Image (cartoon, rainbow, N blue to C red):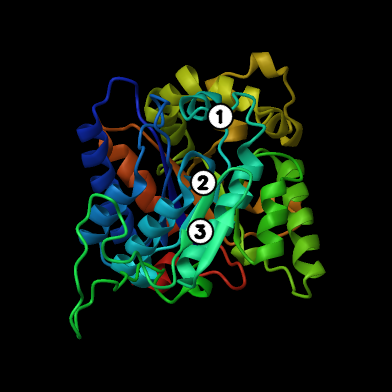
Amino acid sequence: MECGIFHTPYMRPGRTDKETFEYSMMLAKAADSFGYRDFMVGEHGMQAWENIPNPELLIVAAAQVTERMRFAPMAHIVPLHNPSSLAVQVGYTSQLLQDRYFLGVGAGSWENEAVLRGQPGDLSEAHPRLLEGLEVMDKVWRRQPFAHEGKYYKAAWLESGIDAGSVDHHDAFDLKDGEEYHALADHSPYGGADGLEIAITGLSKGSPSHVLAGQRGWTPISFYGGSTLLRSQWDVYSAAVEARGDVPDGSRFKVARDVFVARTDEEAKEQAKNGALGHAWSKYLMPVYKKYRILQGFIDDADVKVDINDVDLDYLADHVWLCGSPETVMAKIERTFEQTGFRYGQIAVNTHDALDDPAPWVESLRLFATEVMANIEVAGSKSPVHEFA
């Protein structure tokens, strides 16, 4: 089974951008050496806990200190960008990394990020802006003349460029034979517009993002919130795939989880509770997972049922996180396969701020890749050990 990294990142408020960047480089190098297939970097500019506004800066730097791992912004929040500028940026990065780059897109879920850009705080424009923005981006990548004037965006690709002297403050001049005044740079994606892998994340039950993934042949990613949620996403994705005459493949599905592995269950639980994972949940993720109604899905799946307001770190370690020895974590994963009814192809580990004591966190990443995921079979996915040994 494949393993990946979902680097939101969950950094403690007060960390400087430089600290976050350097910690990210360390995690990328470690993950690459352990055989992780993907390193996906979140894009947020307003949340103190999710503090990377430009994933490409980190991605290009990390690609220079790693050898095999693929990278993706996960996700570019398309409604927050000028789509033409974003298309050029993505194409440029894709050409730099070639087959080690893929693109993640999303509509966004934080109200303050929309308001900062002058958009409604209720996110009512988010999904239509996503769809129209993607339409513009695709046109830019194809490098053919077009004129787009939609509800939210206006863009054009000129057939022959701007004539010399046509701008008022430019002096007219004559072009000589062989001069390339009108030559346009090619920042289309590596492999062309149709060769770029695109992935999209979903949070909600029956997520429209997963419908879109199925319709367009994109890679679906889920933030796991229990078997009912994931099954609903798989169902709408599968239906969309079948509607376009294809066969849904579970190995394409990536699922983001909180993970901590140690040699024994007791060691894993204590380190997870008292380390980066427990701190992030205590200070930040508990209200987030309640807001998006994700936490209840874990409770519904657990043998031990509690009121959502009574969930504590012990309950999280036992019933929510993939926490324990390699054998225990493998058993927890196999149970999710049984509960959801399909075998998905990758688990992407959510990263947390272990900057002050990284050794246990890095060892957990190693154990997860080499002693958990390498021993779980999913048809069509790639074992980290076999792929990268």
Residue under label 1: 119
In-front residue for pair 225/269: 225
Q: Quadrant of the C terminus?
A: bottom left
Please tell me in which quadrant of the rendered image residue 343 appears: bottom right
Q: Residues within 10 Å of mark 3 (few under 14, many from 20)?
A: many
Q: CA distance from mark 2 to mark 3?
A: 10 Å
Residue under label 3: 137
Q: Are marks 2 and 3 in contact (CB under 8 Å)?
A: yes
The reply, left or right, for residue 346 in relation to residue 227 is: left
Please tell me in which quadrant of the rendered image residue 380 appears: bottom right
Q: Residue at x 34, y 64 (%)?
A: 162
Amino acid type shown at disc 3: Met
Residue under label 2: 78
**Which mark's residue is nearer the viewer, 1 or 2?**
1
Q: CA distance from mark 1 to mark 2?
A: 13 Å
The reply, left or right, for residue 14 in relation to residue 35 is: left
Amino acid type shown at disc 2: Val
Q: Residues within 10 Å of mark 1 (few under 14, many from 20)?
A: some
Query: Disc 2 or 3, which lies upstream in sequence?
Result: 2
Q: Residue at x 46, y 43 (%)?
A: 81
Query: Disc 3 or 1, which lies upstream in sequence?
Result: 1
